[in-house]
Each structure stands twice: as C-alpha cells, then as structure tokens.
Image (cartoon, grey):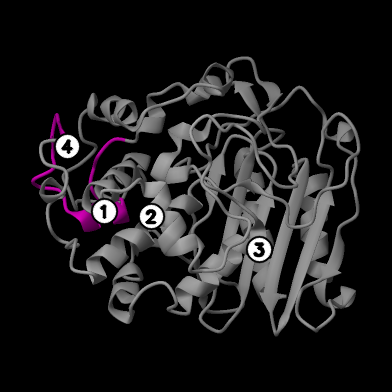
Amino acid sequence: MRAKTTSKVRRGLLVAAAVGLMSSTAVAGTSASVTHPPKDRALRESLDSLVRQEKFPAALAWVGKDGRETSLVAGSSRLDRQVPVPHDGQVRAASNTKTFTAVVVLQLVAEGKVELDAPVETYLPGLVRGEGIDGRRITVRQLLQHTSGIPNYTEYIGVESFEKVQHRFFQPHDLLAAALAHPAKFAPGAKWEYSNTNYLLAGLLIERVTERPVQEEITRRVIRRAGLRHTYWPQPGDQTIKGPHPHGYAIGDTEKGNVVDATEMDPSWGGAAGQMISTPSDLAKFSRALVDGRLLPREQLAEMRRTVDAPVFPGWRYGLGIISVPLSCGGVYWGHGGDIEGYETRGGATDDGRSVGLAVTALPGTFGDAEKAAKAVVAAVDTAFCE
C-alpha cells in the first residue's frame, strides 16, 4: 500500500530478543523433486539475517525453480512467545492487489469494453474533479501506470496514527474525497509518482463497466483462473486472516513509537489498491501465470510490460500494475510487492520459469533502520532468484 519505505528510523519498544530465532527450515513442494538443503543455504542465511539483523519477527519464502518447490521460514509467529512460523502462511498482500486489478482492466480492454488511452471520464463521468485534476484529461493507462498526478489518499486518512484507524471501516468514495481535496501533484503524464488513488479509481471503473463488485470480478477472472487456493478478498467487516498465519506488527503511533499487533485490522482502506490476503506461494504462482500468458492475451500483456522509470530502487521500472526489477545474476523479474501495517511482501516471476514469493511480518523500520531493512528484503528476493 505504501508508496515507498520511509527513510525515518523507527525503533519499537519491543526488542528483537523477545522474538528469539527459529532456524529456517525447508520442506519439499508438491512436485516429485526433493529440496536439498545445500542448494538453499544462501536463502536460508538471508531469511535468518532478516530476523537476526533487521529485527523482523518472522520471514517466509517460497521458491519455484528447476522443477522443484521450496518453502522456508525463520523467526517466530509471535513477539511475546516462541511460536513456529507456518510454512507458506497467509499474509496481507497489500499492493500486490494492484496487479490483480490491472489484469481485470486489461481483460476488459481485450474484450473491447475499455480503451487504455481513453479518458477516465468515459467510464466515471464527473467523478474525477479537483484542483488541477480533471478526469477528461487523465487516461486509463495513466491510472494504471501512476502517471496521473492524482494525490495519494493514504497520505490524508491518518494511517500514521495506525491505532486510531486499525478497526475503522472506510467507504471508497470517502477515500477518493480525501485525495481530491488536495491539488494535483503534476500534470497528467508529466512524471511517475505512486498513488493508491489511481487503483481506487481503477476498481470503481471495473465496477461501472461490469456492473459487479470489483472483488467478485477479481475472484472470477484472476484468482480462480490462476488456480490460487489461498488468496481471497476479505468481505466487509472481516478483520481476520482465515488460514494459518504469522502475526504482523506495526508502529501504533509514529509520535509514540509503540509497537502493536496489527494482525487483525479493517483492510477497507486498501480496496482495489491493497485489500487482498494471500500466501508467498500463491503470489509467486500468480506472477507465473501472468508472465506465462495465462491471464491476458499477448497484446494486453505487452502493454502491461511497457514500463517507465520508477525511482524506488535503482533499475526499477513500472508497467501497468507490474514492476520490472533487475537481478544480480542478469535479466529481470516481473512482480509487484506490497506494504501494509503488519506485513511486507515481495517477489514475482522471470521469463525463464523462476518464481519467488517472500513476506516479513512488519514494515521496514518497525524495529530498526527502515532503509537498511527494505534493502535487505529486496536482496533476499534477489538471492531466492539467483542462488
């Protein structure tokens, strides 16, 4: 959900010693091949480092490569006591939801129901208006690529005081109003800047065109088609995580610096930009299905992979709801990632068949240096692809 990790150092009141460390362990996947520990040593060490050095309570990884599947975990599911981390446990997927939303929009493009370069006004007449903001001058493509200039609603709804909004229900139009009360960041198409409001609008567009709830369309068109068994959109009022899961932790208030259990929360402020729940393996398999062309026709997948520079980390480029990330071993992987109080997820798939999903149970900076921790998560994903 968050645009990027803040560089401000957050130091929680709970020390990492309370977490303890459970050595990372591997289990064989559903394929016939068996995971051989020496092959996964570098990734094991990376996960252990995320817990020991970067102070994440837990880390989970799933890797599909060379015909075998590997699940690894490190840390503890709870801060207050030692609890095993469930292999491939469910986590809040946050902004990975954007890729699901983008896929549905592009399916509608393939069906001739939406035009990428048509104004947003065509589908949401009179809705997108504000100081320097005009839906007649912003295209659907600019929404999906974060080049619209529309302000990010998460900057204005009080998530910096997470305890106050943790159990609050938000209506989509209230979130939109919070964003449109502020002037445009720049003229449409002038630059790239991440804004959850773009995908809030993409979700509303899907509902207007299909005349069905966005969560229903994502479930029918993407989750079921990709065969994802542990991915779902929480229904209104559902603040829980249904399947086996590690607890997630967050700063309750940035001024106080207190740490709270963020596992149960109302995710309605995520919406089409970040509401979904998934597992590392499902996120990796979703990226695999997408890159392999099982969710979109060739023309729309090519449009999705037309990228612009996204200066979050060096070399990152943003397409239509998907990010191209360079690998140290050459080439790139295609994925997204997500940040929401309690959980951060990263991963994706390469064109040559590798796929990775990784999650940690706090945002970078909850227990230490935010920038250092964020880079460590990205490095762990690189290790999973390249070792």
Q: Amino acid at mark 4?
A: Val
Question: Residue at image x 41%, y 26%?
Answer: 170
| Mark 1–mark 4 distance (CA, rounded to whole Å) | 19 Å
The tag earlier along the polypeptide, 4 or 2, is: 4
Checking the image for residue 281, the label placed there is 3
Q: Which residue is mark 4?
A: 128
Q: Quadrant of the C terminus?
A: bottom right
In whole angstroms, how far apart are the C-alphas of marks 3 and 1? 29 Å
Marks 1,4: beta carbons within 8 A: no
To which quarter of the image does residue 46 belong? bottom right
SS of the residue at dot 1?
helix
Residue 112 horizontal side relative to residue 45, left or right: left
First in residue order: circle 3 vs circle 1: 1
Disc nearer the start of the sequence (3/2): 2
Q: Position of residue 273 (x, y in %)?
A: 41, 45
Instruction: Residue under label 1, please give it.
Output: 210
In this rendering, the label closer to the viewer, 4 or 2: 2
Q: Which residues are magenta?
A: 129-151
Q: Nearer the viewer, residue 32 or 50?
A: 32
Q: Amino acid at mark 2?
A: Glu
Percent position of residue 221, x then y: 41, 63
